[in-house]
Image: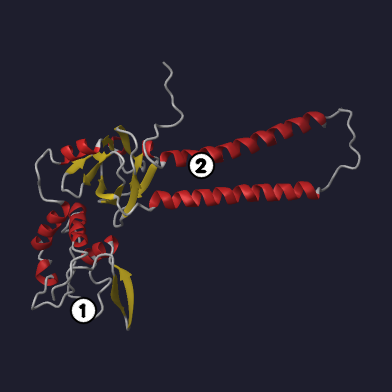
Amino acid sequence: MWDFPLFPEQASSNAQKVDALMLFEVGILLFFTILICVLILVFSLRFRRGARVDRSHPPTHGKAMETVWIIVPLLISIVMFVWSTRLFFELYEAPPDAAEISVVGKQWMWYLQHPQGRAETNELHVPLGQAVKLNMTSQDVIHSFFIPAFRIKQDVLPGRYTSLWFRPTKVGVYDLFCAEYCGTNHSIMIGKVHVMEPADYEQWLSAKGVGPSQAEEGEQLFVQHHCAGCHRGSQTVNAPRLEGVYGKPVPIQKGKDVGFVTADDRYIRDSILMPKSEVVAGYEPLMPSYKDQISEPDLLKIIAYIKSIATRETSQ
């Protein structure tokens, strides 16, 4: 039986919006392609050699035609720009209530961890109707996280954090691909996304028992790597406290001037791996680098811990 669908199944809240924009642009493309081809054919036949037509006083310009030829494409371009820009921001600005899941790409697998602590490889379980935000990075080379049924794709880069969000609308199992050639076995870097009823998802989360959450694992690593000795009010090392820091502006010493950066995932990661690149004003650059000592999944856990104490006030 013939089974060659032009589009993958629409299984996210953004899928219909992406398809509508693409169909509009393809329709415009086809319309003008067919129009130009038909005009070329008609005029080629009408003014072919030997045809009896009036060839005197051929028009060299037409103001009405030139005006239409400028105005119509301009209006269509503006519609495309506004429509695609609005959709771009909708695709990349996650709702504030989105559940955050960490993703690490590496040759040739996807490692994912839920905030509740459960981790999985090449599998992603999500609840139906819940907005999900993926915080992604790569451990080695450039990958690309692609779920065709959700119409989402985002590069996953080493040394940087990128994000992506979706809201699944249909229970089912959907393909997950790496859409960026990342090495010899790129073709095996595939997986499945399982969209479950919320009750089934909660049952799946607790199937292996209640373990430490991602933030709790991050706190353990925070202590294990001796970060707590300095950032929890040590009497010997003058280091900034981290309670209430996440998401807030941090004063950075830049020569004789002081600038501000936001304490987001990028800043925390760089502060761990390149601590002398952005030193907090008023503190000495004493912290050693943890580059090649802490893995990407562990960095995400530590960030999750620091994020978890964002609303906590410093006791000092």
Distance (Cα) linking label 1 and label 2:
51 Å
Q: Is residue 47 above or below residue 233?
A: above
Amino acid on which the number 1 mark rests in the picture: Tyr
Q: Nearer the viewer, residue 269 or 246?
A: 246
Check the image and name the residue furthest to the bottom. 256
Using the image, tell me which numbered label, if any, was put on residue 107: none
Q: Position of residue 71 (x, y in %)?
A: 69, 50
- Residue to which mark 1 is pinned: 283
Q: Position of residue 106 (x, y in %)?
A: 25, 46
- Residue to which mark 2 is pinned: 21
User: For this view, does 256 lie left or right of residue 213?
Assistant: right
Secondary structure beneath label 2: helix
Q: Nearer the viewer, mark 1 or mark 2?
A: 2
Check the image and name the residue furthest to the top. 1
Q: Note whether residue 156 is visible.
A: no
Q: Nearer the viewer, residue 224 or 135?
A: 135
Quadrant of the rendering where the N terminus is positioned:
top left
Amino acid on which the number 2 mark rests in the picture: Leu
Q: Note whether residue 234 is visible.
A: yes
Chain-order first, disc 1 or disc 2 = 2
Q: Position of residue 74 (x, y in %)?
A: 64, 51
What is the image's colouring? secondary structure
Q: Position of residue 257 (x, y in %)?
A: 34, 82
Give the crowd class for mark 2: few <14, some 14-19, many >=20 residues within 10 Å.
some
At x 31%, y 41%, the residue is: 129
Secondary structure beneath label 1: loop
User: For this view, does 28 lie left or right of residue 128?
Assistant: right
Q: Is residue 92 above or below residue 189?
A: below
User: For this view, does 248 lie left or right of residue 24?
Assistant: left
Quadrant of the rendering where the C terminus is positioned:
bottom left
At x 71%, y 47%, the residue is: 69
At x 63%, y 36%, the residue is: 31
